[in-house]
Image (tube, helix red, strand yellow):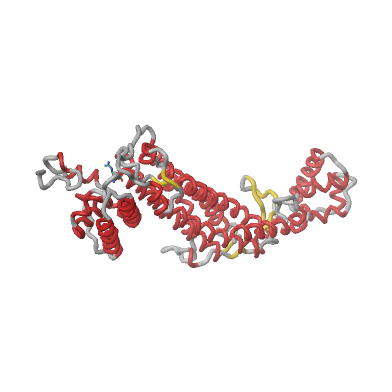
Amino acid sequence: MTDKTSNQMWGGRFAAGPDAIMEAINASISFDKRMAAQDIAGSRAHAAMLAATGIVSDSDAVAMREGLLTVLSEIEAGEFTFSTALEDIHMNVEARLKDLIGAPAGRLHTGRSRNDQVATDFRLWVRDQLDAVDQALQALMHALLVQAEAGSDWVMPGFTHLQTAQPVTWGHHMMAYVEMFGRDLSRVRDARARMNECPLGAAALAGTSFPIDREMTAKALGFDRPCANSLDAVSDRDFALEFLGAASICAMHLSRFAEELVIWSSAQFRFVALSDRFSTGSSIMPQKKNPDAAELIRAKVGRIFGANVALMMVMKGLPLAYSKDMQEDKEQVFDAADNLMLALAAMEGMVRDMAARTDNLEAAAGSGFSTATDLADWLVRVLDMPFREAHHVTGALVAKAEAKGCDLPDLSLTEMQEVHGEITASIYDVLGVHNSVASRVSYGGTAPSQVRAQVARWKERLG
Ligand code: ARG
């Protein structure tokens, strides 16, 4: 008999239990208990398969499957005592099953290993998260579509280098983010389709000599098929890395938008009013209303991309097949998933609540010679001037307006003609910001008609 203190799951060859430090570095139960539901689903599918293939008796399988449901309800009710000595969720669940049903519990681990078990549990967990992110992205996109539709013809400055470039529409700006989050959505769906293969039955690394049915367990757990190579099945964490990669890019998009909201809500810009629900005050400066939610969203990309880098570093250089290093995968993914979901929900709330200050947007849209390109285009179109020359003439007009301290539409026709004699009064038609945006009807352009077409297209795609 082994020493009582050695591990009851694998302690057969051990004379003594682990050092306290060994137990502390080895145990994962403090975090992998989050996969309890997935672990129990995997074990229930495995038990049913063991009976269907005649590897265990039907009565044992029934006892196991029912006992596992009892364990799940204990965990869900918060009545389960997790033990660090039992290392992880897999052994905690199995030990409790043994308390509940006795001997048949010892047959559950036939034809499998914790290596394929953890790979299966974690895939199921990541798959659920991909679905949750999918939903959250759609909700955010719907909120952006509402803003875009309301403001398809509100003009605002478009920027390059954060310098006023050309007038654009509010709706067009919102729809740029719909495109970004739409790509995030397709990345999430691609990752889901690729990861939906079942490692269960790969056993420790080489498969098993028991006549298991891997198609059956794969199907029961909602996977498209079993993983085709047992070594790869237990050592692959691409699905976690793809989740973190997609999450990182999504968080980067959220961060860019959050930064715009921070700038736009400042006293210097005053482009938007953020709601009280997503702002905070200062404990010393009574006038302050801070865009904290936006700032925190802006920051989340740091930890999410950090998780991506961390897991990439854990995985690099690992020989096939399973190594304990891989236990370090979960905390990174859990933290990234929690924070991405929080950031998506906060952004959705902010977008739903925010109010564009249309007067300020319009005033800003017309400043900074924002219609200079329209003027140059007029010279090309009406006077048949080569664009390079038109650019030069427009530059001279901008210099003149700047010297006078006025905007382009404020120059008189005589002043315009001093720069180029053939300019006529119809040039003023293209200098207004509304004319400017309305004229940009090229596919994907900022014209309200284009924006409305894109809103309709996305509404149909999202359903
Ligand atoms: N807790 C482990 C993990 O998360 C489960 C797999 C352990 N396998 C083993 N051979 N020690 O990776």
Spot occupied by residue 299 in the image (x, y as percentages of width and height): 45, 51
Specify the quadrant that holds the N terminus: top left
Image check: 386 left or right of 136? Answer: right
Q: Image height check: is 460 above or below 209?
A: below
Residue 289 visible at all: yes
Q: Position of residue 343 (x, y in %)?
A: 47, 56
Q: Is residue 34 visible?
A: no
Residue in the picture at 10% in, 47% down: 4
Position of residue 18 relative to residue 450, above or below, is above
Q: Estimate the x, y position of residue 78 in percent, counting from the top left.
A: 27, 64
Which residue is farthest right? 422
Instruction: Report the residue at 48% width, 67% height from top.
Output: 277
Tell which of 383 and 281 is nearer to you: 383
Residue 287 coordinates in the image, percent (x, y)? 49, 65
Q: Residue furthest front?
A: 54
> Looking at the rendering, which quadrant does residue 272 occupy?
bottom right
Please tell me in which quarter of the rendered image ligand 1 is found: top left
* Residue 235, quarter of the rendered image: top left
Q: Quadrant of the C terminus?
A: bottom right
Is 457 situated left or right of 378 in this image? Answer: left
Foreground of the two, 159 or 241: 241
Across the whole image, how many numbered discs are drawn on residues?
A: 0
